[in-house]
């Protein structure tokens, strides 16, 4: 198995990659250390900045070795000479981008990384390991974090080595390196289309490791194609019939943009927790997923002539708001028990003007069930469809987010409910598009 972990400087790659490798009993390869070592050798040979093209030959000849120590950073050697500390110094950090942009140097290390993987399971960490070195890796992870957080992490790392540097200086250094690494022509820092992104800002190391290991065990979730339909025993014939032609038309009509498809699981019980702005929301969700969604909808809808009959046959069921509706809860649990998708609108009421409403802690009732995955989803644009009597066709965006990370059993029920609704509130905020995205 090959796992690639890419991302900008300070996003947490080294720590995560090393720990994941340890946990899964795989080897770990720090590709940045290779480029750093080549940079050190090139600097010593006086090849920087004018003769970088000669660095490839140096890199090819350098017997770079990694020695893993259980509780320590990986030690790096060139032959018998240890360079572990030197390659992390300021001088190397300043010039590593230039040296690693050289085609010859990249070719040497790309080859060496592939040779490493031929020896068996490996976790690689770098900038291009999921895009260039192993486009067919079994699992690709892309880590990001805010620049302030990344600078702070680097500062702690340096402090541990007895080096002190100001935060502002580190932020400037990292920004410069980001720009250079992403802007270069050859193997630029870029998220592979099929990589799973994790924003590690504010996440604990353990949480990130947990997530990556879970993906490694389950196989990488992949984006499904829009034409895909996954059948389930709870499918209703009307839904299946409608699904055979409605989604394409509907998506075209609203120029729909569907993001984060890889997060939506193709099997197993799912709570799809969505924001709510229009009565048409369930239809927008329906055309954005390959599985039938069983919506919990307000009971009032069943009072509107044939509407109740219709949505019943699309698999929805009524809930009486403002009371503990036992029947609705029972039905929801049946849906999850059957391994199907339960659609809920935890804001309770529509936010017709846009924005988000307060999350009802009742979402925890379903989300915290064993084995249930809770996927947040945000729809934008549906609030603009119906204005008075006018019907418009605004562009609609649907964004699925990564599964919510929910508290374990060891906190009280009410605390768990609170955490669940807070996590969902945050997820909605994260998924909201930027102004530029909207139209
Ligand atoms: O991860 P790091 O900070 O040790 O990496 C040092 C530099 O090496 C980074 O600025 C870009 C370069 N690099 C690269 O170009 N390709 C890789 N696969 C890994 C690192």
Image (cartoon, helix red, strand yellow):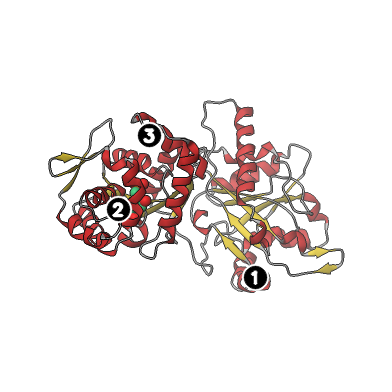
Q: Distance between the residues labelled 3 and 2?
A: 30 Å
| Identity of the residue furthest to the left in this view | 80
Residue bearing the label numbered 2? 2
Mark 3 sits near ligand 1, with its Cβ under 8 Å away: no
Residue bearing the label numbered 3? 158
Q: In which quarter of the view is residue 310 placed?
A: bottom right
Q: In this view, does 171 lie to the left or right of 70?
A: right
Label whose residue precedes the other's in the sequence (3 or 2): 2
Q: Can residue 365 be seen in this view?
A: no
Foreground residue among 394 and 182: 182
Residue bearing the label numbered 1? 255
Asked which secondary structure carries label 3, the reply is helix
Q: Is residue 90 left or right of residue 255?
A: left
Foreground residue among 167 and 73: 167
CB-based contact (under 8 Å), mark 2 and mark 1: no
At a point 75% along the width and 57% down the height, the residue shown is 278
Q: Position of residue 215 (x, y in %)?
A: 40, 48
The 10 Å Cα crowd at callout 3, few under 14, some 14 to 19, many 20 or more, is: some
Label whose residue precedes the other's in the sequence (3 or 1): 3
Mark sitting on residue 145: none
The 10 Å Cα crowd at callout 2, few under 14, some 14 to 19, many 20 or more, is: many
Foreground residue among 263 and 13: 13
At a point 64% along the width and 47% down the height, the residue shown is 429
Asked which secondary structure carries label 1, the reply is loop
CB-based contact (under 8 Å), mark 3 and mark 1: no
Mark 1 sits near ligand 1, with its Cβ under 8 Å away: no
Q: Is residue 323 visible?
A: yes
The 10 Å Cα crowd at callout 1, few under 14, some 14 to 19, many 20 or more, is: some
Asked which secondary structure carries label 2, the reply is strand
């Amino acid at each position: 198995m090959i796992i690639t972990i890419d991302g900008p400087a300070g996003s947490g790659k080294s720590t995560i990659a090393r720990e994941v490798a340890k946990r899964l009993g795989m080897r770990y390869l720090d590709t940045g250390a290779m480029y750093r070592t080549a940079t050190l050798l090139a600097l010593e040979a006086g090849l920087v900045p004018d003769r970088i093209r000669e660095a490839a030959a140096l890199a090819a000849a350098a017997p770079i070795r990694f020695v893993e120590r259980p509780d320590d950073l990986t030690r790096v050697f060139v032959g018998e000479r240890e360079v572990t500390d030197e390659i992390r110094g300021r001088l190397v950090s300043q010039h590593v981008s230039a040296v690693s942009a050289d085609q010859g140097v990249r070719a040497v290390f790309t080859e060496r990384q592939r040779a490493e993987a031929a020896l068996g399971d490996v976790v690689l960490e770098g900038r291009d390991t999921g895009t260039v070195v192993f486009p067919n890796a079994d699992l690709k992870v892309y880590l990001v974090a805010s620049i302030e957080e990344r600078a702070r992490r680097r500062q702690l790392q340096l402090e541990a080595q007895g080096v002190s540097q100001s935060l502002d200086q580190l932020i400037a250094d990292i920004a410069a390196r980001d720009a250079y690494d992403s802007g270069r022509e050859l193997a630029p820092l870029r998220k592979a289309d099929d990589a799973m992104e994790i924003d590690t800002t504010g996440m604990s190391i353990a949480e990130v490791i947990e997530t990556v290991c879970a993906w490694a065990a389950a196989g990488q979730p992949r984006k499904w194609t829009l034409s895909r339909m996954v059948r389930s025993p709870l499918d209703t014939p009307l839904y299946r019939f409608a699904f055979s032609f409605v989604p394409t038309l509907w998506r075209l009509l609203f120029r729909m943009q569907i993001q984060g498809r890889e997060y939506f699981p193709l099997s197993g019980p799912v709570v799809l927790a969505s924001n709510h702005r229009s009565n048409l929301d369930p239809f927008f969700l329906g055309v954005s997923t390959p599985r039938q969604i069983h919506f919990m909808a307000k009971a009032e809808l069943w009072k509107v002539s044939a509407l109740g009959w219709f949505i019943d046959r699309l698999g929805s069921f009524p809930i009486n708001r403002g009371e503990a509706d036992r029947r609705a809860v029972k039905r929801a649990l049946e849906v999850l028990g059957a391994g199907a998708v339960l659609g809920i609108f935890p804001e309770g009421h529509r936010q017709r003007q846009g924005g988000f409403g307060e999350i009802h802690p009742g979402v925890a009732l379903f989300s915290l069930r064993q084995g249930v995955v809770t996927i947040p989803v945000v729809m934008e644009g549906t609030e603009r469809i119906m204005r008075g009597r006018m019907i418009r066709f605004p562009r609609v965006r649907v964004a699925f987010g990564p599964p919510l990370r929910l508290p374990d059993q060891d906190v009280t029920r009410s605390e768990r409910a609170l955490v669940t609704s807070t996590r969902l509130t945050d997820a909605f905020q994260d998924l909201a598009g930027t102004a530029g995205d909207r139209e």
